Amino acid sequence: MHDLFSLTNLIFLAIMSVGLIGLIIPIFPGLLVIWLAALGYGLLAGFATPGWIFFAIITIFFAAGSVLDNVVMGRQAYKDGASLVSILIAMIFGILGNLVVPVIGGFVGALLALFLVEWIRRKNWREAATATRGWAVGCGWAVLVRFLFGLLMIGIWMIWVLV
């Protein structure tokens, strides 16, 4: 039975690893995959104390990572001159772009939307390009933020498994 349990843990770790690797792709819900794997583990192993505490911490990291990833993208664009309205429109078009052209549609959709709104707002393509570059740089930082939160979630799960 111990070998079966160890195999089960390896399967959950493999699923979480797919989620972690997927965090590099902007539209892949890697944090959600890691969280769902932790939920599956909890349902299988039980949420008796301290399990529910570990799962609560994983859930907090999931929520924080999901929010911070968008904040990082928008903040960098804002620092480079984009308006809050432009950033919100870029986020909406990013979501729509993911639906139309998975994998790259969200990134391209957000960049195009931000550039067009800023160009219309400023009447200056160079300033619009600077704000758009800020969004792209923010996307790079967001990947790092998501990845770190994914590592934290997996680390907490590993402690849970060992306890």
Image (cartoon, rainbow, N blue to C red):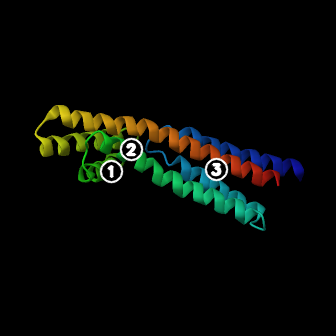
Residue under label 2: 73
Identify residue for label 1: 91
Q: Residues within 10 Å of mark 3 (few under 14, many from 20)?
A: many
Q: From where the camera sits, is residue 140 visible?
A: yes
Q: Earlier in the sequence, mark 2 or mark 3?
A: 2
Q: Are marks 2 and 3 in contact (CB under 8 Å)?
A: no
Q: Amino acid at mark 1?
A: Met
Going from the N terminus, do you reach mark 1 or mark 2 first?
Answer: 2
In the displayed image of the protein, which residue is found farthest to the top? 126
Using the image, tell me which numbered label, if any, was put on residue 153: 3
In percent of width and height, residue 79 lies at 32, 42
Vertical comparison of 126 with 65: above or below: above
Graded by Cα atoms within 10 Å as few (under 14), some (14 to 19) or many (20 or more), the crowding at tag 2 reads many
Residue 119, image x and y in percent? 15, 40
In terms of depth relative to the viewer, which is nearer, 22 or 149? 149
**Residue at the image point whose x is 76% and y is 65% from the top:** 46
Quick check: marks 1 and 2 in contact, CB under 8 Å? yes
SS for tag 3? helix
Q: Residue furthest right?
A: 1
Kind of residue at disc 2 = Met
Of marks 2 and 3, the one in the foreground: 2
Disc 3 residue type? Met
Residue 28 numbered mark, or none: none
- Which badge, 1 or 3, comes first in the chain's sequence? 1
x and y percentages locating residue 71 in the rendered image:
41, 50
Name the residue at 35% across, 44% down: 106
Marks 1/2: CA–CA distance: 9 Å
